[in-house]
Amino acid sequence: MSKYFLRNLTEEERESIKKNKNRKPMKKIQMVDLQSQYYKIKADVDNAVLNVLDSAAFINGPEVKSFQNELEQYLDVKHVIPCANGTDALQIALMALDLKEGDEVITADFTFAATVEVIHLLKLKSVLVDVNYDTFTIDPEKVKAAITPRTKAIIPVHLFGQCANMEEILKIAKEHNLAVIEDNAQAIGADFTFADGTVKKSGTMGVMGTTSFFPSKNLGCYGDGGAIFTNDDELAHKLRGIVNHGMYERYYHDEVGVNSRLDSIQATVLRKKLPLLDGYNDARRKAADYYDEVFANHPNILIPTRSENSTHVFHQYTLRILNGKRNELQAFLTEKEIPAMIYYPVALRKQKAYFQESDPKDFVNTDQLLDQVISLPMHTELDDEQLKYITDAVLEFFK
């Protein structure tokens, strides 16, 4: 830049040039920024992992027991049974119910496949039902209509970060003597408030709850991990045996089990992150508030509905696009290096592995959501510059 040019600038213009020259480039936008989150706790996590390596207590070490106890306190639940991943957690929970081949389990058609996968692995029958259009969670009225003499359990999924309508689901389950297993992989830390004012953590209201500690989850480890929660002493005893080859006494196998353990390194990482979980969820809500404020009154966008009886921890921030151009929006954002994901593009009932005959009239909401939903970047490390860039891009698409 020439001296002559600078001499003809105002003081304000010179200051603006200086600021722009010194400004750091915007951080790369990611769906989930695990690195930036890690750097903030790097010293604590690194020391904790090194301590595990020094101890050589890699399996069932004291870190696993300590994490179990701390999670029990956080959730206010009697028993946490750690395991290898969230899918195992669901499978083990179903195994503990002693269901028979062909018994029916009701769950949502609009969710990740793991929920249905474990039902089929155990030779049970999945009965898929529609979800609420606004909350994306299982519709209690559809659950009620799907119950048959062979129905034995309901798996409500707390999708994208808030609880399904557990008050109604638990009433239905009690009336029909059904077990409720909460799939809490996406909503750990959310609170559900009952009509009488009682507040419970997600995953602690049914006979069992399950979760995943996959790295991208709100409480994620640095590998794979999962857990089952219950307040039932007998079930807890059974679950602890199932996760360990069906053993209650070493080398004596009382029932068919699996090998599914949370290792000590993952447990020590989770111990460092658990005290930060509420703060992590607050950061996600703050990012969601920013998105909401920008998109709230847009004619072609519906923002996520926040349930009256559940807090939202925004595992995902999922918009509904009303003008039929969801896929074009995703492509437009990709060009601007903004990741945006479609959770989920295909109904479970139409997946090759789980196909079941259905009447489209019974799945109006699911089928509509499949064509409308798009999830924007959502994590604890989003800053205002990134959020402005993302929201400006979305608004630009609709001009």
Image (cartoon, grey):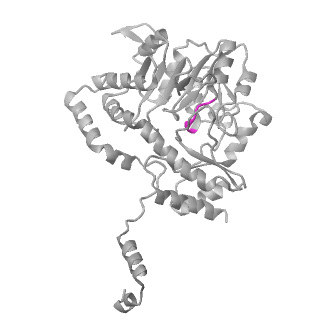
Residue at x 68% of width, y 37% of height: 350
Residue at x 76% of width, y 38% of height: 364
Direction from residue 111 to residue 10 in the image, left or right: left
Direction from residue 266 to residue 195 in the image, left or right: right
Establish if 261 lies above or below 334.
above
* Quadrant in the picture for the N terminus: bottom left
- How many numbered marks does the figure carry? 0
Residue 136 visible, this orientation = yes
Establish if 309 lies above or below 78.
below
Residue 256 visible, this orientation = no
Write down the quadrant of residue 396 in the picture.
bottom right
Direction from residue 322 to residue 304 in the image, left or right: left
Q: Position of residue 326 (x, y in %)?
A: 66, 54
Direction from residue 88 to residue 302 in the image, left or right: right
Establish if 193 lies above or below 281.
above
Q: Main secondary structure of the magenta part?
A: loop
Q: Position of residue 115 (x, y in %)?
A: 57, 29
Residue at x 36% of width, y 33% of height: 270
Q: Which residues are magenta?
A: 160-164
Tell which of 100 and 307 is nearer to you: 307
* Quadrant in the picture for the C terminus: bottom right
Residue 225 shown in magenta = no
Write down the quadrant of residue 165 in the picture.
top right
Q: Position of residue 26 (x, y in %)?
A: 42, 62
